[in-house]
Amino acid sequence: MSGRKLKVKHLHTDILIIGGGTAGCWAASVLGAEGNRSVLIAEKAGIRRSGCLAAGVNALNFYITDGHTPEDYVEYAERDGEGIVRKDLIRTLAERVNRITRELEKQGLVILRDENGSYAARGWRNIKINGENIKPLLAKSALSQKTVSVLEHVNITALKTVPEEDGIRVTGATGFLIREETAVDIDAKAVLIATGGAAGLYRPNNPGFSRHKMWYPPFNTGAGYAMGIRAGAEMTTMENRFVALRCKDTIAPTGTIAQGVHAKQINSLGEVYEERYGLTTAGRIYGTVSENRDGRGPCFLKTSGISREMEQDLYKAYLNMAPSQTLKWMESGRGPSEADTEIEGTEPYVTGGQTAGGFWVDTGRRTTLPGLYAAGDVAGGAPQKYVTGSLAEGEIAAESILKDLSQRKDFPQPAPADEKEIRGYETCLNNPESAITIGQAEEAMQKVMDEYAGGIRTDYRYNESGLAIADARIAQIEALTETLRAEDMFDLLHIYEIRDRLTVCRDLIAHMKARKETRWHIFGENASHPDKDSRFDCYVNSRYRDGRLEILRRPLVETSEYAHGDAPDLPVREEGREAGV
């Protein structure tokens, strides 16, 4: 191949962690403490300030307070998720989060306490913290382990696999450095995907130069989902999208206000509407959208009349994680004690930390591909895991990796360097100018998803004909990205980010088409099937086989331990008939 060629850097490690965020850092700390295995974290940015915790956080939303049990949390998550959750996964998280919280405090995290010296609670499952420095603390914990190293500013794009008796085994990954013209070939005995979920699939609230002012980090592109999908890993419940209820314009969290000062949701008439629609996560955003649609908007959190002390607490809380909201209050000259706080919904996201979309894993967080594990936002089945749940999941995955490596002695030879993937990088660097730019490809994707796959424009509703149009047009955009030209490695990063998002879009659309009901208002508002259907009391899963996505349905897991193969395939219902997988 003529033109620009990349150097190839070969690396070897026992355990590769893709993603140095919440779950990845904690998993590295656990693995490093074992002391006998080399661990490499491959991170797209710099792990001290990467991932969802980059800017900090002001509460730990998953903590079992006095008088409650892990089983209480399982029941809460099951109720909030309308039954489509993995109780075995949630229970294993709930059993660990309190211990992990105490460990975080020992490492330097400031946890606020009440007048009795107990952790200051914000509801029965939340505690208040000063968490601006939480990510640096997690990074320090990981890097203090002698066997842990980090490769920063690297974009991983594909998993390396070798054939095994019953399929394939993951033996590493391929990517490229963002700051130099170098491809990276990594061999590993075990790979943990701990990347984030997917933002940027839909047209966002704020257009133009503010388009990346969104709830979920814009640099979380669903890369972990995408490389897993392309390798043939089974995914679950991707159709359970997440739409956040947020402060208007700043997209700052509303829970800080709702729980911190017990503010109710009200419409423009001053009526409290939240209880009419249910107090689930989906119900709160559904009520807001419905009130606006019926002409009773805009909607607010009723903060006017709170005390000055409460107002000061809100200012401080938002400075810990969303300073734009405090600045907005200051600039307007009217704080929350004087004016109610307007709220709105964001565009949809796919994230296993809030809802249930992600890799289908066993109780030990093994994916369906041997050698590959998943934790954090990229792992499915366990919604409402938040920070401490993601830490616990990283710990569980790490323990499974150590157990599996100790039990297996004969590892296959790693796959050779993925020449096809590396040539793909070089093709982008040598492509002539295409008819579409990277930015135009992103805008085209977001327009399609917004208009035909349940974005803000349609009040999050979608139907079967619209999804068919969305799938066809996303496929067209996918084909166009093959012609995109990268002027440098940063352009190359953006090309692969848009390709990853498009892969996730295709899988998301397939899931939305397959769940022929409306189980979660707003999160899965299917106008062709507006009611809940008991025939879909099951998991909708997908996997990529022979060039196409196939849909599976699996029965609800009721056991405390689940291994792959325990839940048989159920018939897939397509176009009014039962069809086998």
Image (tube, rainbow, N blue to C red):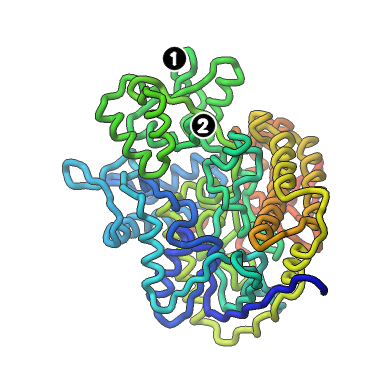
Q: Examine the rendering and report whether any part of residue 366 can be seen.
A: no
Q: Nearer the viewer, residue 457 or 406?
A: 457
Question: Residue 108 location in percent, x, y?
Answer: 28, 59
Label 2 residue SS: loop
Question: Residue 405 location in percent, x, y?
Answer: 52, 79
Q: Amino acid at mark 1?
A: Gly
Question: Residue 211 location in percent, x, y?
Answer: 60, 39
Relative to 144, 374 lies left or right: right
Relative to 223, 402 lies left or right: left
Q: Earlier in the sequence, mark 2 or mark 1?
A: 2
Of the 4 image quadrants, the one containing the C terminus is bottom right
Task: Say if 113 sits above or below 11 in the image.
Answer: above
State the residue lying farthest toward the left: 116
Q: Nearer the viewer, residue 419 or 541?
A: 419
Q: Nearer the viewer, residue 57 or 123?
A: 57
Q: Amino acid at mark 2?
A: Asp
Count the marks: 2
Could you say which quadrant of the image residue 346 lies in?
Answer: top right
State yes or no: discs 2 and 1 in contact (Cβ < 8 Å): no
Give the class, few, some or many, for how many residues have Cα within 10 Å of label 1's Cα (few <14, many ≥20): few
Of the 4 image quadrants, the one containing the N terminus is bottom right
State the residue lying farthest toward the top: 269
**Residue for point 81% across, 39% down:** 469
Question: Residue 500 location in percent, x, y?
Answer: 68, 55
| Mark 2 and mark 1: Cα distance apart in space | 21 Å
Give the class, few, some or many, for how many residues have Cα within 10 Å of label 2's Cα (few <14, many ≥20): some
**What residue did someone put label 2 on?**
249
**What residue did someone put label 1 on?**
270
Label 1 residue SS: loop
Q: Examine the rendering and report whether any part of residue 441 can be seen.
A: yes
**Residue for point 45% across, 66% down:** 27
